[in-house]
Amino acid sequence: MMKLWVNVCFHYVPERLENFNKLIKNLQKINCKGVKVVINSNTNFNDDLQIDVAELADPFHLTWEHKKYMPQFLESDYTHFAYLEGNVDVSQKTFNYWLRTRKLFKDNNFNFIPGIHRIEIDEEGKIYSLDCTNRVNINNSQKIFIDDDMYLSLPEPYQGMFIMDREMVEEHIKSDYFNVGQKGWWGIRESANLGNTFINPPAGFNHRVLVPMEHFSDCWVHHMTNNYVTNVHSPHSKILVDKLFHGN
């Protein structure tokens, strides 16, 4: 059974506490051998939580603070490491999907990563894709099939979080993505979230992250602030998830 180590990045603002507290409660309810939660923040705002207060020359580097815990994770008996921002509604469903799909990929000798897809919900209850700014043509997409189920490579693989097993953490530490700095055209904060997305992708694929087509909602994680769907100037959260894919 999974034993989970989680680092949560949370820049303290009182208005953000409601979503943050929901995330912490969800993590405490995960059915596993144990859950260790470390909060990387700019201030100690709760004496009941393990909070690592970072004094940084650049506040954008807060998203990188979880990296220093990865060697400690490998020295422990924890089995899985997760990095989250403090505004995502991660639950048991998320980890069940990830574990099931990771095993499926490994059993079939595929070096892919189970994708997480963030969504936002508007005031009418409509669900939007946060991480895709364009509709996806299935016919022109990189994909694999396992037992007739399709797993698709999205052209925009950013997911704002990651889950890793011990093998993946070891791989990450040895990569350039472990070192602080902007990666490609991704911003400095976003680069910290890329995980192993672009490390040794299989031949013919631009990255390693795949999402399930038969049960797409299994990989959804709610971005609880819903701040992109209400921002008319942002291209994010403008495509309904049920309109995201086209083609056969």
Image (cartoon, helix red, strand yellow):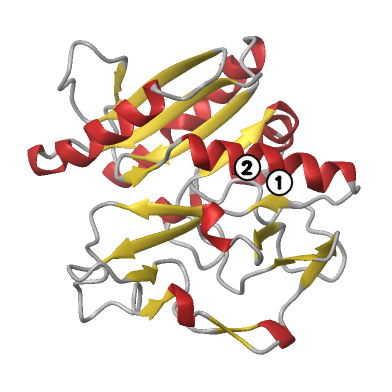
Q: Which mark is residue 101?
A: 1
Check disc 2 and give the amino acid type.
Trp
Q: Is mark 2 on a helix, strand or loop?
A: helix
Decide: is 124 above or below 19: below
**Residue at left 29%, top 33%?**
56
Looking at the rendered structure, the secondary structure element under dot 1 is helix
Residue 64: % across, % down: 44, 38
- Mark 1 burial class by Cα count in 10 Å: few <14, some 14-19, many 20+: many
Relative placement, left or right, of 182 versus 73 is: left
In the image, residue 168 lies at what x, y percent? 71, 36
Return the residue nearer the eye: 176 or 83.
83
Question: Is 11 placed left or right of 149 in the picture?
Answer: left
In the image as oriented, which residue stretches furthest toward the left?
A: 14
Across and down, in percent, residue 200 comes to: 79, 53
Determine the residue positioned at 59% across, 37% down: 96
Separation of marks 2 and 1 at Cα, in angstroms: 5 Å
Left/right placement of residue 165 relative to residue 91 reads right
Contact? badges 2 and 1 (CB < 8 Å) = yes
Pick the residue in front: 8 or 115: 115
Write down the residue under mark 2. Answer: 98
| Disc 2: CA contacts within 10 A as few (<14), some (14-19) or many (>=20) | many
Tell me the amino acid under the disc marked 1.
Thr
193 to the left or right of 222:
right
Q: Is residue 168 visible?
A: yes
- Picture quadrant of residue 10: top left
Q: Please name the residue shown 72% across and 30% down the image.
A: 170
The front one of 205 and 72 is 205
Where in the figure is residue 199, as x and y percent of width and height?
A: 73, 51
